Amino acid sequence: MVAILNVGYLSLLLTLVGIFLPLHGSAFAPPGLSHLNKRTVAQFPPSQRRHDESRLPVSSSTQINMGSSMNQPPPYPIRVTVMGGGNFGLALATICARNGIPVTLLVRNQEIATHINQKHQHPRYMQNITLPTRIRATSDPNECLPDATYIIHSVPCQYSREFLSSVSEYIPPNTPVLSASKGIETKSLGFMADILKECLGDERPYAFLSGPSFAREICEGVATAVVIASEDLDLARDLATMMSDESFRCFISKDVVGVEIGGAVKNVIAIAAGMCEGLGLGTNAMSGLVTRGCGEMRRLGLTFGARSSTISGLSGVGDTFGTCFGPLSRNRKFGYRLGRGETMEEILASSTEVAEGVDTSKALVNLIRTKCKGYRLDLKYPILFGVASILEGTTTPMEGLKGLMSMPMQMENFDERPYEFVVKEEECEP
């Protein structure tokens, strides 16, 4: 028995080492990331010049050099602007600053900017967290957007269109944008990729970050793993290299749709999980609910062309676990208070933080009804439809639970059929 336990602990240790081992010279490193230098700013592949070199002057500050395979091309500076001074915006700014990159936070008013610049803390968010001195803040978009090498968007989804429209004139056409916002816009039923392209143009390179990543834990240096998805893998690699360090690990993907669906649906599942906890239903109910919710996420993802592996990865199931079970989850807390009997109006009035799953829930149901075909969609997505019904006030959390438990008997997964109905391909040939 002791030997078995020792082997189990050894396996767990090796798994953690494989995820968070420093990226340079590591056999575990994803392609394009093995040249990370943890003591200086990351070394970037030639694709970075394609994004930046035509716009940026050579400077002695924050120099980036190419890998050893290149013949010492001229260095150039990296500057990052983070749009949005909320919890996650502060966390992403901290990551970049921790890696030696100057970061400018674009916040709503100059009073907040002055407070951050003088005290290195946000007056409302991430209290007791001291921000790196490389972070400075401003409320003037013209001061930080025109010369940014990369722009990180961290404004909540429902406010993104208005914000992006107000700053679009300051963003050069070739500047890459990394979105860390998650959700579906209630009016257009569009994902963040749709909103960004409509507001900033569809020819610039975009990337999308998602995964189980609570902002406070990132700022505290707790081990975190995320995924960055982009249709341009060179951009994804550059961003992953720039942001990764010993405690923050970025993987890359081309499945933008899968990453976006996982990031949106997980917040709705977290509200359901919170209600389950608030009702005091126990571990069995919570585990079953979250698992079935992930099944609905997978079904929706496949309908929109996402890869099943993405849904089962960091941005899907991984982020769902963190949001459903993590004590820092805003959406879980919102659901918990609903389960305890508070009304949605009471919860919204007493909270300063946005629970993205509330608006996303309504948008998801409308999206499914608009884009998905088939009979009785409510049977294929009972949790997503159930949460929306509760938020609309047409049913209570307890009634929603009874509805789930009284559903007709069916296959666990809709894409599975009983063996007797499966026809082999060779039997269909003439």
Image (spheres, rainbow, N blue to C red):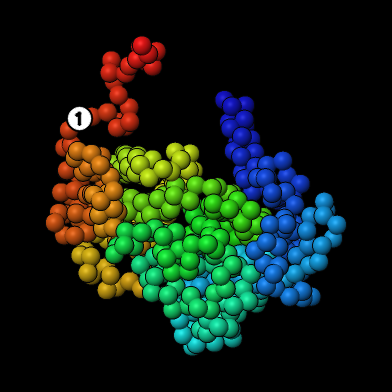
Residue 81 placement: quadrant: bottom right
**Residue 120 in sight in this render:** no
Residue 71, image x and y in percent?
Answer: 85, 57
The crowding category of the residue bearing disc 1, from other C-alpha atoms within 10 Å (few below 14, some 14 to 19, many at least 20), is few
Q: Secondary structure at mark 1?
A: loop
Residue 299, image x and y in percent?
Answer: 34, 40
Quadrant, the N terminus: top right
Q: Is residue 176 left or right of residue 335?
A: right
Quadrant, the C terminus: top left
Q: Residue at 57% across / 73% down in the picture?
A: 172
Q: Residue at 62% across / 45% down in the picture?
A: 19
Q: Is residue 286 left or right of residue 236?
A: left
**Residue 195 in sight in this render:** yes
Residue 290 placement: quadrant: top left
Q: Which residue of the protein is positioned furthest toward the front in this rendering?
A: 430
Q: Residue at 49% across / 88% down in the picture?
A: 111
Residue 240 lies, with reference to residue 28, above or below; the image says: below
Residue 36, image x and y in percent?
Answer: 73, 55
Q: Residue at 48% across / 77% down in the picture?
A: 167
Residue 298, image x and y in percent?
Answer: 38, 41
Give the amino acid type for the residue marked by disc 1 in the picture.
Met
Give the mark count. 1
Dot 1 corresponds to which residue? 409
